[in-house]
Image (cartoon, rainbow, N blue to C red):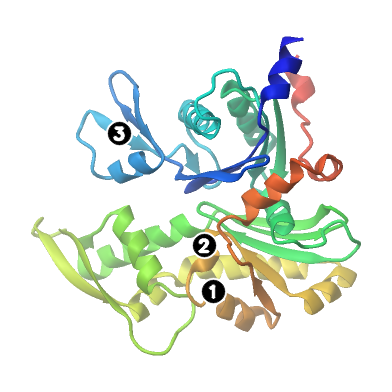
Amino acid sequence: MGFSVLGWISNDLAIDLGTATTLVYVRGRGIVLNEPSVVAIEKKTELVLAVGVEAKRMLGRTPGHITAIRPMKEGVIADFEMAERMLKYFIDKAHNRSIFVRPRIIIGVPSRITQVEQRAVRDTAELAGAREVHLIEEPVAAAIGAGLPITEPSGNMVVDVGGGTTDVAVISLGGIVYSESVKVAGDRMDDAIVNYVKRKYNLLIGEHMAERVKLEIGSAYPFEGKKTMMIKGRDLISGIPRTLELDDAGIREALQEPIGTIVNAIKVALENTPPELAGDIIDRGIVLTGGGSLLKGMDTRLREETNLPIITVDDPLTSVVLGVGKLLDELDLLSKVTVQAQLRSSRY
């Protein structure tokens, strides 16, 4: 009886548990939370000092007794305990700190997630307070969020470039016909910029600075006019802080490898697509979504590489969580697209 009452007063949640950002959608209210997937703790006591935006500000700036942790790595949980604490904080915040709520939660996960990784996500959500957990692959969620007719017998290709992974999926009749997932996305682009500046200029820059460079002058395809940006870092030879000017051509060179990996994953997926569905993709094009797709010229580069139309969604950052959110109201569709809990029976 207790559980049914709790279920009745709960607000069901849809969560895009991302490597870089976590978004939470509450049924009937829309997106209520959009925060970095970061937790700051005190090392000795393991007391959580900050989560989300506040914790991200501390990345690379903490004194010795404080550490800022990103519990998600390459699309999956890397630190189980911190992920649970982070998720509990976000669930409580979405429900205005109510301790009586045990919501049904649907979580977007990368395609090709292993059974062990599935179990980790389920267990984390349950320990954080969920009464029921469903998992849905992010490309399917992104396709639903983008309004694609995924239940029809026709092929839709979605490329979801996130923070930790890029998921490429061909979807038909509500399911994934073929998927390709590479652990190269926004974070790997930031790393590539850090390494380029270190290698070429003997200057060490932090995560924040690399991300700013990517957003301001980063590109996947040359554009008209030259763009430059001043950056600050530590000289690796003298150890003294130094300022340096970077241009878009250098950063494009730095991003060649991660972008090339993403392009290759798309080509492999196209090669493995059944001929009938390939014909649909020629007509409909490839839908590009996820935060990493905001890199300037990404759509042009993919169009050039595949000779296919590239469709960018209105808000690529939210398409996964909006798709997961739609499933809160469409339980018939949820039962068709949910990742099956094959490990459930092994628990008992």
Answer whether residue 315 is visible to the viewer in this image: yes
Residue found at x 19% / y 35%: 63
Q: Quadrant of residue 269?
A: bottom right
Residue 192 screen position, x and y as percent: 39, 63
- Which dot marks residue 292? 2
SS state under label 2: helix
Question: Rounded to the nearest whole Å, what is the CA distance between mark 3 and mark 2?
Answer: 26 Å
Left or right? Give the position of 309 relative to 38. right
Which residue is drawn at the image coordinates 67% and 39% (left, top)? Answer: 27
The residue positioned 16% from the left and 58% from the top of the image is 236
User: Where is residue 206 shown, x and y percent of the image?
Assistant: 28, 54
Q: Residues within 10 Å of mark 1 (few under 14, many from 20)?
A: many
Q: CA distance from mark 2 to mark 1?
A: 9 Å
Residue type at numbered disc 3:
Thr
Residue at image point 46% right, 36% down: 71
Q: Are marks 2 and 1 in contact (CB under 8 Å)?
A: yes
Q: Residues within 10 Å of mark 3 (few under 14, many from 20)?
A: many
- The x and y percentages for residue 311 are 67, 73
Count the marks: 3
Residue topped by disc 3: 67
Q: Which residue is mark 1?
A: 298
Is disc 3 placed on a helix, strand or loop?
Answer: strand
Alpha carbon separation for disc pair 3 and 1: 34 Å
